[in-house]
Image (spheres, helix red, strand yellow):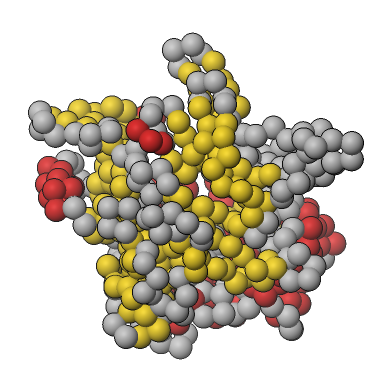
């Protein structure tokens, strides 16, 4: 079971304090959630933090001190001594709270549940007016006289008496604001006709909203603050390789800003900028070991799918290469509700350093490109998504970039699923398949979720029908022609390790070539430098051997 806890670290005293509420021994069950940090310096007092808190009902026979509330509430905690005071009573239906810049709770997200206690996927967003009082529903919302189907509230601004969040607007996710006054009449702050707006930019200890972000061919940040917009633009021009500038932190008065400058060939440098001195000071590199190492440039491209649809992708070639007749890798992203973006990618750069051309397709079923592109998602409409992935391999060969006898596919999570499922659709296309933490059986995904309250949502996401059989590579092992390498952590909470264990067994039973590496006690991201290093070397050797036909 996944567990989360919050800690505060006193650097001067080398002391650590647990901020999460400790449940009583008389509690029914245990708290998985340790809470979320909602606000700092509440009431202007340093060290006073607002936390969400999961409360549990307690055995009450023979005592009046037992807690009888259950659900998510909020508490004000003094990080110096651990003293806590309840600010918001527990709500069994609450999923999260949002505080404004003054530290007051303004937004609450609730979920509806079915008779079995499972979430239905329907959410309600509530607000509290500036003068306090009870929670109120946003009710029916409109923008420019048009009804808004859904509003995913993300931030609150007391100075403007507004809530920020995401709405569906003309087929794409857009950023909108709605007043906290019950009128329900909002306005679009940022929208695009080609991609989703997906990120709020917030800075400072009060998490002030200063902009929003979206990704076209490259990530773009639209600052609402003119001063920050000019600063980011000027720094982007002044620094090497014209990197993307992301403001990730600020002092209380916002006179000092913490920036990260990164690009496709630069893993990133952290800078401290002082507004009053107009001075920019490097703090530390994001990946210091790679300083001075030449990287491959990532280039946005499109290629035609079998039905003529142009699929956006990123092509990275080895430095100094003419880009012709190379061993090549198609690398589909995870998710599938995600997308690849321009920027530094350690997996891509490893393979590029080994001499491979790497193509990352944002196949149909990816998010970020609107509702129509996402479609039914990459599982229910796997033939469309995997067809696009395979078309990426064919395009590399047709353009003379990749060799037909030197084409491989590598992926992580859904990307690993896509790598395996590509064999089901077209066994002869790729000469080697490497899958890290892959989904291998759609039935397993639904089964694994049944112990959790989101099981109904997962069931609806996966769907029912013939695609459960045809879209599960474990059940189609006999169709495989290429050798396969599988990598998985035993504590994976996203994709259970049995997906790879049983895929390896199925391939072996079918007489297919398969190697399987298992990493004890690691989760989905295999977050261990030594393990990642060993895995990369292993994949490199596996691909080299497979390409040589050994």
In the rendered image, the vertical position of residue 301 relative to residue 254, given as above or below: below
Placement of 44 over or under 225, stated as above or below: above
> Is 111 situated left or right of 520 in this image?
left
Dividing the picture into quadrants, the one containing residue 256 is top left
The residue at 43%/27% (across/down) is 47
Tally the numbered discs. 0
At 36% from the left edge and 74% from the top edge, which residue is drawn? 183
Q: Position of residue 93 (x, y in %)?
A: 65, 60
Q: Is residue 199 visible?
A: no
Q: Work out which residue is located at the far top of the displayed protein and give it.
A: 13
Looking at the rendering, which quadrant does residue 64 occupy? top right
Query: Image height check: is 275 above or below 356?
Result: above
Residue 25 shown left or right of residue 405 in the figure? right
Horizontal arrangement in the rendering, residue 125 relative to residue 519 (left or right): left
Residue at image point 14% right, 34% down: 275
Q: Residue furthest toward the right?
A: 62
Residue 335, horizontal then vertical, whole percent: 55, 62
Q: Nearer the viewer, residue 168 or 35?
A: 35
Residue 461 or residue 131, whichever sits in front: 131
Q: Looking at the image, can residue 469 be seen? A: yes
When the figure is inspected, residue 192 is found, relative to residue 275, above or below; the finding is below
Left or right for 292, reference 17: left
- Quarter of the figure with residue 200: bottom left
* Residue 37, horizontal then vertical, whole percent: 50, 41
Horizontal and vertical percent position of residue 125: 50, 65
> What residue is drawn where x is 47% and y is 56%?
133
Q: Which of the pair 138/332 is nearer the observer?
A: 138
């Amino acid at each position: 079971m996944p567990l989360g806890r919050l800690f505060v670290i006193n650097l001067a005293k080398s002391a650590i304090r647990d901020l999460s509420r400790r449940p009583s021994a008389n509690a029914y069950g245990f708290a998985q959630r340790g809470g979320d940090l909602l606000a700092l310096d509440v009431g202007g007092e340093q060290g006073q933090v607002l936390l969400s808190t999961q409360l549990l009902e307690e055995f009450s026979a023979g005592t009046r001190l037992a807690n009888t509330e259950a659900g998510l509430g909020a508490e004000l905690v003094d990080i110096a001594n651990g003293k806590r005071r309840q600010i918001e009573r527990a709500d069994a239906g609450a999923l999260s709270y949002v505080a404004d810049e003054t530290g007051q709770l303004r937004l609450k997200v609730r979920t509806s549940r079915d008779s079995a206690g499972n979430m239905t996927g329907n959410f309600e967003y509530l607000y509290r007016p500036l003068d306090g009082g009870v929670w109120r529903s946003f009710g029916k919302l409109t923008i420019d006289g048009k009804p808004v189907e859904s509003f995913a509230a993300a931030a609150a601004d007391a100075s403007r008496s507004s809530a920020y969040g995401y709405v569906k607007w003309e087929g794409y996710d857009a950023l909108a604001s709605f007043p906290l006054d019950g009128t329900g009449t909002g306005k679009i702050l940022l929208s695009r006709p080609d991609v989703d707006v997906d990120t709020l930019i917030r800075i400072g200890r009060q998490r002030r909203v200063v902009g929003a972000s979206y990704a076209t061919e490259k990530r773009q940040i639209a600052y609402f603050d003119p001063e920050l917009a000019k600063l980011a633009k000027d720094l982007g021009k002044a620094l090497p390789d014209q990197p993307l500038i992301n403001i990730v932190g600020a002092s209380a008065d916002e006179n000092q800003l913490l920036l990260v400058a990164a690009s496709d060939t630069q893993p990133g440098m952290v800078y401290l900028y002082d507004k009053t001195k107009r001075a920019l000071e490097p703090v530390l590199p994001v990946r210091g070991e790679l300083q001075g190492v030449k990287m491959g440039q990532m280039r946005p491209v499109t290629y035609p799918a079998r039905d003529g649809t142009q699929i956006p992708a990123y092509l990275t070639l080895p430095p100094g290469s003419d880009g012709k007749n190379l061993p090549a890798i198609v690398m589909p992203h995870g998710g599938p509700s995600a997308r690849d973006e321009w920027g530094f990618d350690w997996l891509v750069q490893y393979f590029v350093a080994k001499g491979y051309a790497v193509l990352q397709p944002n196949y149909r079923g990816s998010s970020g490109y609107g509702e129509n592109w996402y479609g039914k998602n990459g599982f229910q409409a796997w033939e469309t998504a995997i067809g696009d992935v395979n078309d990426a391999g064919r395009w590399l060969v047709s353009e003379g970039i990749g060799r037909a006898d030197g084409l491989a596919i590598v992926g992580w999570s859904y990307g690993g699923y896509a790598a395996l499922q590509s064999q089901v659709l077209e066994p002869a296309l790729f000469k080697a398949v490497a899958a890290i933490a892959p989904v291998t059986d759609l039935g397993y995904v639904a089964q694994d979720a049944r112990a959790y309250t989101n099981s109904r949502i997962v069931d609806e996401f996966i769907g029912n029908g013939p695609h459960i059989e045809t879209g599960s590579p474990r059940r189609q092992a006999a169709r495989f022609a290429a050798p396969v390498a599988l990598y998985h952590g035993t504590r994976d909470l996203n994709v259970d390790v049995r997906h790879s264990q049983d895929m390896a067994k199925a391939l072996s039973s079918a007489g297919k070539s398969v190697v399987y590496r298992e990493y004890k006690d690691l989760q989905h991201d295999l977050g261990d430098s030594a393990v990642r290093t060993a895995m990369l070397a292993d994949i490199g050797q596996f691909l080299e051997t497979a390409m040589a036909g050994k």
